[in-house]
Amino acid sequence: MSISTITIAGGDLRQCYAAKYLAESGFAVTCFHTLDFPYNLDIHQENHLATALAHAQVILIPTPVSMDNIHLTQKNPKFPPTLFQTFAEALPLKGIVTGTGLSDSFTSVLSKRQISFCSLSNDSVFIRANSALTGEGLLAEIIRNTPFSFRQSTVVLLGCGNCGKAVTNIMSPLCKKFYIFEQNPKEETDFYANTTTWISPNELIHILPHCEIIINTIPQQILTRKQLLLLPENCHIFDIASAPFGFSSDITAQYLLPYFRLPGIPGRFSPQTAGTIIGSAIERMIAHEL
């Protein structure tokens, strides 16, 4: 089918810049409870949910679609909260839902209502570009939140998927020592073949006592209590994994270790670029008939 109408719901400034990109690309764009636009464009802003979704052929959801599993993620305080269930029930049966926050629980809701969905996470171009933005923003957060020089730091990265590779490329040349720990490394791949900092579980226990920074990209607990007790008291932990994250929220209370859980880095540090990346990914999906 020919796609011309896109509705963008809630979210942060990424949604605004995605709207800008798509409107400039010739799509009819409607926004529901997005932030105020920092530009003048022919983008319709609709505050009534049913009207905003009525003719939508593609619906871009926020990332994450809900922060509390109760309300739609909305960063604009002038709008009343929208119940997530109300939003889900209002989605048009003939619309196609897209975004990066398509959790299993949300796709289950969509499947039960026979609503089509297409994840941006299936777009390799988007994933690489968004991961690079995550790495840039993470470096800024590390520098802002640590009392010591990054160049003098020993860093351990947990997990080396797309975000892990981007973090490695950006940070490994800048710090004193950079180690990668991956539970199931594919050592035959080019990335691992060219990386001399990969460490085994046996090596990890000897490095943790000298580690100033831990970066986690794996959405599950990797370090055991015994391993956490090896960390020096000034070790800072930065968790960029999706839920359920890599560390419990009470890790600071339990181990007296500084802990920073950092979701949505591209939206906070590079919303214009991140929104453009989202818009261009949607454009590619539409060009390939989703």
Image: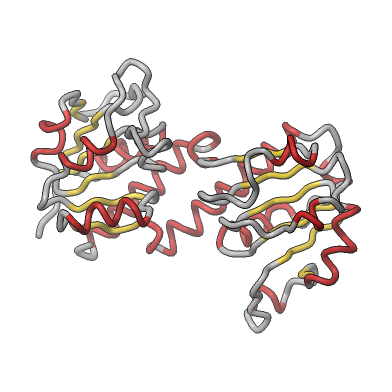
- Quarter where residue 180 is shown: bottom right
Q: Position of residue 45 (x, y in %)?
A: 21, 26
- Quarter where residue 25 is shown: top left
Comparing 45 with 26, the one in front is 45
- Classify 189 as above or below 279: below
Comparing 287 with 222, the one in front is 222
Q: Position of residue 19 (x, y in %)?
A: 29, 37
Residue at horizontal 27 percent and vertical 36 percent from the top: 9
Residue at horizontal 14 percent and vertical 52 percent from the top: 3
Q: Residue furthest top?
A: 78
Q: How is the image coloured?
A: secondary structure
Q: Position of residue 8 (x, y in %)?
A: 26, 38
- Classify 52 as above or below 129: above
Left or right for 237, reference 136? right
Comparing 99 with 228, the one in front is 228
- Classify 62 as above or below 123: above
- Quarter where residue 39 is shown: top left
Left or right for 54, reference 204? left
Residue at horizontal 14 percent and vertical 48 percent from the top: 57
Residue at horizontal 33 percent and vertical 15 percent from the top: 78
Q: Quadrant of the C terminus?
A: bottom left
Q: Quadrant of the N terminus?
A: bottom left
Q: Position of residue 40 (x, y in %)?
A: 28, 23
